[in-house]
Structures are given as structure tokens and as C-alpha cells.
Amino acid sequence: MAVKTFKPTSPAVRGMAIADYSVLTKKDPEKSLLKSRKKTGGRNSYGRITVRHIGGGNRTKLRVIDWKRDRVGIPATVKAIEYDPNRTAYLALIQYVDGVKSYILAPEGLKVGHKVESGPDADILNGNVLPISSIPVGTVICCVEMNPGKGAQLVRTAGASAQLMAKENGYAQIRLPSGEVRMVPEKCRAMIGSIGNAEHENVKLGKAGKSRHAGVRPAVRGVVMNPNDHPHGGGEGKSPIGLPGPVTPWGVPTLGKKTRNKKKQSGKYIVKSRKA
């Protein structure tokens, strides 16, 4: 897949680059696999804004994705490649031999008519899901479980992939897209291949309206606010923030401040930090 550019007929179109949707084979989603999506506008149950810059946007529905792939040993056929407005990756609509349909993330190279399967006896082919204990070391994987049976949690964005580095003592070492090497139980499952739509990172919105269509409201910099609205605000003319480091509107350090708890229980599974 590539991105499409246009002749500069307007300032917005001049800098715009959109995805080439020619790889998609079906326009309308499968109605039986849709759920309604409630909009919050960033507000909690009290009506107070707890997450800023959220509101508006086009109405979308959630696609019910099979993250667990627990229909072991039952082959399925790819019926369509579809767009999902809720994520960067494309979806593959698959139908099992018993007629059941489900959505999965479409890995790179998966096309209509291909067969996919899950289970320890499945082949090492794109779209198949196997326990990590059955996957050879060095294989490129995606949609990785962190706990057996919980469903895929890692490596789910467009173009992302991880690599199985080693296996020992019931755990596997996986190099994640961030560079972090992490241990997960060998009983966890993963999908072979990398997530498709890798050119998504080259997409340029071109105009502010595209962000509004996605439900993203404008963000105002703190340095242009008044001091009663933001710690960075105030001063005569264009002035620095006047603090040791940037902070949020509530005075909490941000923009580079490490927030992970050093005593977090799962930290023992990190073999190599992404910052190393």
C-alpha cells in the first residue's frame, strides 16, 4: 500500500497525503459484528472534563474483533479486507468452515481467499496464531498475549511487528517495536507476521478539519495562556515557561518525565529497557 498525494489546488490539499484504499475489498462492515460506541466528550459521570481535547467527530461503530482466536484447529477463509475507523490497522473478515464469522487484524500480505488457522499444529504462515512454544526463534510476530488466554495486547498498530528472540524456562523473550525486550510465558499465543497498512505513518492530514472529524478538538499551548489558566502562562510578550521543566495545567511534571512505577510487579519481566 502507498499514500496518495494531490495537485496543490488549495492550501489544505497541498500538504495532504491520504491512504490508498485500493487494498480494501469491502465497503460496508459486517452488521453482526458491530457495537455502538458512546461518546463522552472527555467527561466523567459527574459531567466534568477529565480528558481534554475530545469532542465532536463523525459517528462510528465498534468492530467486534476476535483477540483470543480460541477456535483451535478450525480453518477459516479470508472473505474481505476492511477499513476500521477506530484503529490504524485494517481488518480481515474471516469465515470458519462452520459458518461463524469474525474480525481479525489483517497482517501484511493477507489477501482474500487465504486460509488462516489457530492452534499448536498450525503452519508458520501470516495470519495463523500459535502458542509461542510452537513458534521458531527469530520469527516475526504480532498480536502477542501477555497472559495465556487473555487475548492479544501487544503489537497491534499498523506496520508494527515484534521478534521472538529466545525461549527458556517456560518464558520467551520478545523484542517489541519500541526496542524493549520483554519476557512472556510460552503458553501465550501470537500471530505470525507483521500488521499491515505499514504506510500509515506517511499519512498527512493536511487541514485541521480532519482532526475534528476524528473527534480531536484544538489544543492550546500553555505559554499563550494567562497565569491563572496554566503554570506556563503570563509574562510580557513571548516569554519562557519560567520553571525547571514543563508541567501540566495542574503542576505535574510532563514531556519526558518518567511515570512508570519502579516497584511495579511486572517490571521483573523487562529484560532490556526501550531506553537502553
Image: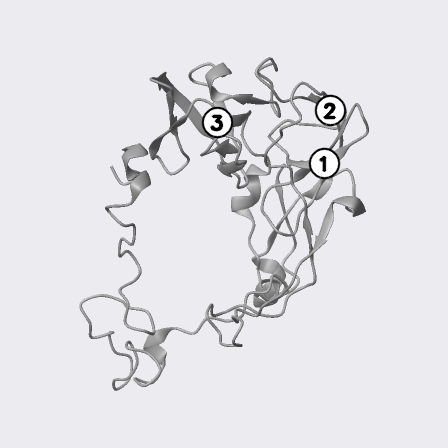
Q: Is residue 228 left or right of residue 156?
A: left
For marks 3 and 1, give the CA distance.
Answer: 21 Å
From the viewer's perspective, is 26 left or right of 159? right
For label 2, the residue is 76
Residue depicted at x 30% and y 80%: 233
Circles 2, 1 touching at the beta carbon (< 8 Å): yes
Residue 221: x and y, percent? 38, 73
Q: Does the CB distance between marks 3 and 1 fall below 8 Å?
A: no
Identify the mark at residue 188; answer none if there is no mark.
Answer: 3
Badge 1 crowding class, 10 Å Cα cut-off, few under 14, some 14 to 19, many 20 or more, is many
Q: Earlier in the sequence, mark 2 or mark 1?
A: 2
Please say if 174 is above or below 19: above
Residue 18 horizontal/vertical position (percent): 63, 50
Residue 1 x/y as whole percent:
63, 36
Residue name at image x 34 percent, y 74 percent? 249
Q: Which mark is residue 102?
A: 1
Residue 189 showing in the rendered view:
yes
Tag 3 secondary structure: loop
> Vertical placement of 216 versus 152: above or below?
below
Residue 117 left/right relative to 135: right
| Position of residue 53 in the picture relative to residue 265 (left or right) | right
Residue closer to the observer: 267 or 206: 267
Q: SS class of the residue under badge 1?
A: strand
- State the CA–CA distance, disc 2 to disc 3: 21 Å
Label drawn at residue 36: none
Q: Earlier in the sequence, mark 3 or mark 1?
A: 1
Question: Going from the N terminus, do you reach mark 2 or mark 3 first?
Answer: 2
Q: Amino acid at mark 2?
A: Ala
